[in-house]
């Protein structure tokens, strides 16, 4: 650990990583503030783990620069950078006891047995695993192994902790519990955490900074709230799952609103703030799932064509506890999802096959950048399960 | 910077490579060279003549020896395949706990860790005129005279080969069978297939690699053997390599070398024939 | 690879089980006969009946009366086997680690090893013997025979290492690096200890393959025999149960080696196995 500086700010500048012909990371630039909890979020293959490993020092960028606390670190070993990593499989040494696992890095530096065991026990106490000090990793459950892996990484006193899908191997219940643990530890220690995950809910639950990635590039890097309520692109909107994506061409502009119509006649309007939208240009927008009201359609023809509404058949109904997830089939094939508060739904429940009218307000329509079909392919995996 | 890991690999592999070249590669080249030498009165004359090969090809003894070796190879192959397959099948599909599987597997394997020669000669008190077999059979009145054919005969040779080499069939087949995804079998069972159908349609095709590997081992071992056939046949039967070892004993290295080369060529043909049927590389490099 | 304990066994189970039992009998029967006969009475012959129970034939080995140089060849075999085991372990483990990367020439070395495995040992021995002769060197048990035996044990060692390293999770090494280990520390503290069962297996192969080796050694051992060579000579010369006594003694040595290896591996694996029974 470099003497003096405990700054855990990370600057990634123009980093590209190639494996053979394939670029896992493309010209990526990102700044992660010191002491932040940052989540790298995206589907498998988006490059998030590669970035993590480059920050850790287990991979080197093909081009580009990485700075931690202001110092360039490319070429330095993990220990020299002041980083420590928690592996997805935990990688606890099977031939050593829990205590020896945690004390491992101290042993490498030549610390005496008494001293390194003392420090290790302290750290085990912090993660509430001191009872298991003499057990072997094989005798621990997944959640216990994870806490030991955490302790082992923290004993090196890093300024940045890197977590590679730390919760993926746990079952749902443990996952929810450990989430809070990680957040608590990070706040206590006051160091930078970088947490790689493919679970949207997890990311927005723990992170100060959420970085949504796709195909080696950053789609959006912002606070959890901004990512959810104001996605920048159709990809982020679809991936996070809280929105429906709409697109079309601008038909006309009226009262400061642009009326956008797609090829199936579905139209939405949005406030043209600042720039005057050009007639004939394509616009992509999104509307939050929980800002939609749904009612049975009285007479099919009446409402079709009206702005900020959509007529369709109920395709799926999923009860999610405090809300009901209603999927309406669109002419384009993509589902249109409305999250209805349970009270409202059960007052007059709908059935699969019912003709319904979905309506929303122009105020709630967001304009997105980029292509309308971005993220469509990943929709199946992303799913979008939000509370 | 990229060359460094490769250099490290070279350094790590170098000692093994060196020994294999010095004590296998070069000696084999020596054998090739010697097969073209002339010889006489216990001395070698380094030249280049085809005489050794011509003599072998023109001699009728050669054909007889090869037929004899091939006969043994084929019989032993068939017997070890039958036994090996059934043993492997039992261990993989009928034994229920991992502990029993490992235990029984070890039980079969341990004898193969002891000396081949000792195991071979252990058959002599068994099969001889006054041996256990004969004494038991005569004791029960099954035969009235000691059976001579049991020892110092082709029968004894085959028995010894099977005793020594069945493991080489069991292990690869066991390996192949163990890798078969159980859900395949369960799906077949669900669809109504009986045990026999499952055996022929699923287990057998998926064990092909193991069978091929085992066959290669057994055939090369039998074709390359010289002491089993010598001892157990009492000198009556011959194999290519036992005749070869006689030539070596008589310090007639060139014809021995030539015989060796021809045998290697023929066995290589047999092995590539088997390999053509099945892809082994995947099996070995796992 | 475990069945759920599911109901009664089909009738075919009993057929297979009997077949298996017969096979085991077939494997162990003759050996057991030899063990029993090695305790043959002083006046007894090579087959039953047993005229008594004595250790006379074991004494014969030690006293070397008309049975050849058993003591000498025995110690040479043990020494050679230990040397071969050590060399096989060191070289196979190192080479196995080297093979983890792709490097030009890896295919050549691999196929050379496989060829060495399949080639009849007699031919390899012939090549070495004649080669030494042409070079004017003496063949001896600790030079030419050692080299010959290594061509037999190293391929086995390599194959075992391939299998073991293939299952080895590289995350362990990365974790070690992450915590500050130098490559040497990584090897000593993480890789080798975790691979220990496999390494013991290689040592076992090296020892037993060498100790029992015959075809490669027969032409390359020179004037001083190893035990298998001595036994071979005995099959033609000796007509007493002393031969069986040799068999018993040599088998005991093999069993001790196997026992030590298997027990160590079992102990190590037991400590590292998850409660579900899956090894790490």
Image (spheres, coloured by chain):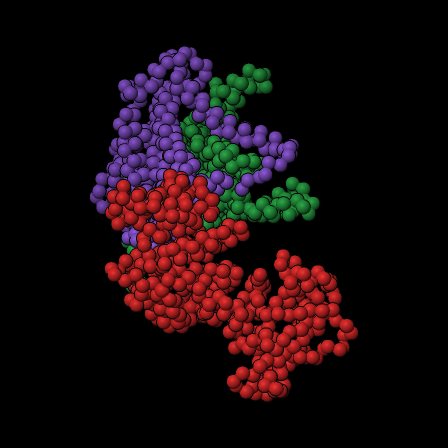
Which quadrant of the structure image shows residue C51?
A: top left
Q: Is residue A158 left or right of residue B188?
A: left
Residue projecting furthest to the right: A299
Which quadrant of the structure image shows residue A9?
A: bottom left
On the image, the x and y values in percent for residue C256 come to: 36, 29
Image height of A265 relative to A136, above or below: below
Q: Residue at x 26, y 36 (%)?
A: C141
Q: Residue at x 32, y 30 (%)?
A: C227
Image quarter in which the N terminus of chain B is found: bottom left
Q: Nearer the viewer, residue C39 or A17?
A: A17
Q: Nearer the viewer, residue A130 or B40?
A: A130
Q: Is residue A347 left or right of residue B106?
A: right
On the image, the x and y values in percent for residue B116 come to: 40, 32
Q: Colour of chain C?
A: purple
Image height of B5 relative to A94, above or below: below
On the image, the x and y values in percent for residue B275 come to: 49, 51
Q: Nearer the viewer, residue B155 or C61?
A: C61
Please indicate, yes or no, whether residue A205 appears anywhere in the rendered image: yes
Q: Colour of chain A?
A: red
Image height of B286 relative to C231, above or below: below
Q: Is residue B105 left or right of residue A323?
A: left
Q: Residue at x 36, y 59 (%)?
A: A191
Which quadrant of the structure image shows residue C36?
A: top left
On the image, the x and y values in percent for residue B199 come to: 62, 43
**Exactly how many numbered labels are in the figure?**
0
Image height of B33 relative to A329, above or below: above
Q: Nearer the viewer, residue B112 or A20?
A: A20
Q: Colour of chain B?
A: green
Q: Residue at x 65, y 40 (%)?
A: B195
């Amino acid at each position: 650990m470099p003497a003096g500086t405990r700054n855990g700010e990370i600057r990634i500048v123009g980093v590209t990583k190639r494996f053979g012909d394939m670029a896992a990371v493309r010209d990526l630039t990102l700044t992660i503030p010191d002491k932040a909890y940052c989540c790298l979020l995206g589907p498998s293959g988006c490059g998030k783990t590669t970035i993590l490993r480059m920050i850790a020092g287990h991979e080197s960028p093909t081009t580009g620069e990485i700075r931690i606390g202001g110092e360039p670190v490319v070429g330095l070993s993990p220990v020299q950078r002041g980083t420590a990593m928690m592996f997805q499989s935990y990688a606890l040494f099977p031939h050593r006891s829990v205590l020896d696992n945690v004390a491992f890095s101290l042993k490498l530096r030549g610390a005496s047995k008494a001293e390194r065991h003392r420090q290790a026990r302290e750290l085990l106490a912090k993660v509430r695993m001191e009872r298991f000090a003499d057990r072997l990793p094989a005798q621990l459950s997944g959640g216990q192994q994870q806490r030991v892996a955490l302790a082992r990484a923290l004993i090196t006193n890093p300024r940045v902790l890197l977590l590679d899908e730390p919760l993926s191997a746990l079952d749902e219940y443990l996952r929810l519990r450990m989430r809070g643990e990680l957040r608590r530890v990070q706040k206590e220690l006051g160091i930078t955490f970088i947490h790689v995950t493919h679970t949207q809910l997890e990311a927005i639950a723990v992170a100060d900074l959420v970085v949504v990635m796709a195909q080696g590039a950053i789609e959006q890097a912002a606070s959890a709230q901004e990512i959810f309520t104001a996605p920048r692109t159709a990809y982020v909107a679809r991936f996070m799952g809280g929105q429906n994506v709409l697109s079309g061409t601008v038909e006309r502009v009226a009262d400061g609103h642009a009326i956008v119509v797609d090829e199936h006649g579905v139209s939405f309007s949005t406030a043209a703030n600042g720039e005057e939208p050009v007639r004939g240009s394509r616009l992509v927008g999104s509307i939050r799932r929980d800002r939609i009201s749904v009612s049975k359609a009285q007479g099919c023809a009446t409402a079709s064509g009206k702005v900020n509404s959509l007529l369709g058949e109920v395709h799926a109904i999923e009860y999610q506890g405090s809300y009901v997830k209603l999927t309406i089939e669109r002419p384009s094939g993509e589902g249109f999802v409305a999250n209805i508060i349970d009270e409202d739904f059960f007052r007059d429940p709908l059935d699969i096959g019912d003709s319904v009218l979905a309506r929303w307000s122009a105020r709630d329509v967001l304009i997105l950048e980029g292509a309308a079909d971005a993220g469509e392919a990943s929709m199946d995996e992303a799913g979008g399960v939000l509370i | 910077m990229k060359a460094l890991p490769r250099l490290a690999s070279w350094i790590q592999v170098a000692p093994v490579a060196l020994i294999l070249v010095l004590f296998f590669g070069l000696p084999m080249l020596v054998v090739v060279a010697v097969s073209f030498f002339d010889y006489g009165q216990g001395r070698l004359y380094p030249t280049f003549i085809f005489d050794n090969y011509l003599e072998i090809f023109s001699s009728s003894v050669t054909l007889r020896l090869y037929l004899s070796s091939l006969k043994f190879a084929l019989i032993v192959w068939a017997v070890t395949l039958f036994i090996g397959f059934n043993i492997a099948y039992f261990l993989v599909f009928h034994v229920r706990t991992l502990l029993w599987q490992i235990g029984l597997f070890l039980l079969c394997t341990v004898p193969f860790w002891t000396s081949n020669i000792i195991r071979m000669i252990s058959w002599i008190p068994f099969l001889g005129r006054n041996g256990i077999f004969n004494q038991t059979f005569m004791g029960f009145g099954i035969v009235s005279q000691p059976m001579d054919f049991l020892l110092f005969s082709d029968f004894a040779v085959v028995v010894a080969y099977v005793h020594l080499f069945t493991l080489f069939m069991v292990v690869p087949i066991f390996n192949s069978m163990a890798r078969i995804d159980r859900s395949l079998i369960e799906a077949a069972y669900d669809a109504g297939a009986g045990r026999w159908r499952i055996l022929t349609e699923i287990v057998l095709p998926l064990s092909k690699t193991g069978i091929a590997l085992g066959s290669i081992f057994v055939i090369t071992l039998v074709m390359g053997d010289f002491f089993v056939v010598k001892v157990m046949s009492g000198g009556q039967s011959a194999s290519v390599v036992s005749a070869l070892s006689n030539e070596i004993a008589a310090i007639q290295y060139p014809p021995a070398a030539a015989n060796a080369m021809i045998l290697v060529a023929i066995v290589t043909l047999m092995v590539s024939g088997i390999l053509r049927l099945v892809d082994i590389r995947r099996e070995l490099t796992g | 690879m475990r069945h759920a304990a599911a109901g009664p066994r089909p009738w075919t189970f009993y057929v297979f089980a009997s077949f298996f039992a017969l096979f085991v009998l077939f494997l162990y029967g003759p050996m057991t006969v030899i063990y029993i006969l090695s305790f043959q009475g002083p006046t007894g012959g090579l087959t039953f009946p047993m005229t008594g129970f004595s250790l006379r034939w074991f004494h014969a080995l030690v006293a070397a009366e008309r049975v050849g140089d058993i003591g000498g060849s025995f110690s040479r075999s043990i020494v050679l086997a230990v040397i071969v085991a050590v060399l096989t372990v060191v070289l196979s483990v190192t080479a196995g680690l080297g093979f983890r990367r792709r490097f030009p020439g890896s295919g050549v070395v691999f196929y050379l090893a496989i060829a060495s495995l399949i080639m009849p040992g007699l031919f390899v021995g012939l090549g070495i013997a004649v080669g030494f002769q042409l070079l004017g060197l003496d063949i001896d048990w600790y030079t030419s025979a050692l080299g010959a035996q290594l061509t037999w044990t190293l391929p086995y060692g390599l194959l075992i290492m391939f299998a073991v390293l293939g299952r080895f999770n590289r995350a362990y090494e990365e974790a070690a690096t992450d915590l500050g280990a130098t490559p040497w520390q990584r090897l000593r503290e993480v890789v080798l200890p975790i691979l220990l069962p496999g390494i013991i297996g290689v040592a076992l192969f090296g020892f037993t393959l060498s100790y029992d080796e015959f075809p490669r050694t027969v032409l390359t051992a020179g004037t001083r025999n190893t035990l298998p060579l001595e036994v071979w000579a005995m099959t033609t010369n000796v007509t007493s149960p002393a031969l069986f006594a040799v068999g018993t003694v040599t088998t005991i040595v093999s069993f001790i080696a196997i026992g030590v290896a298997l027990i160590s591996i079992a102990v190590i694996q037991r400590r590292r196995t998850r409660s579900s029974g899956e090894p790490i």
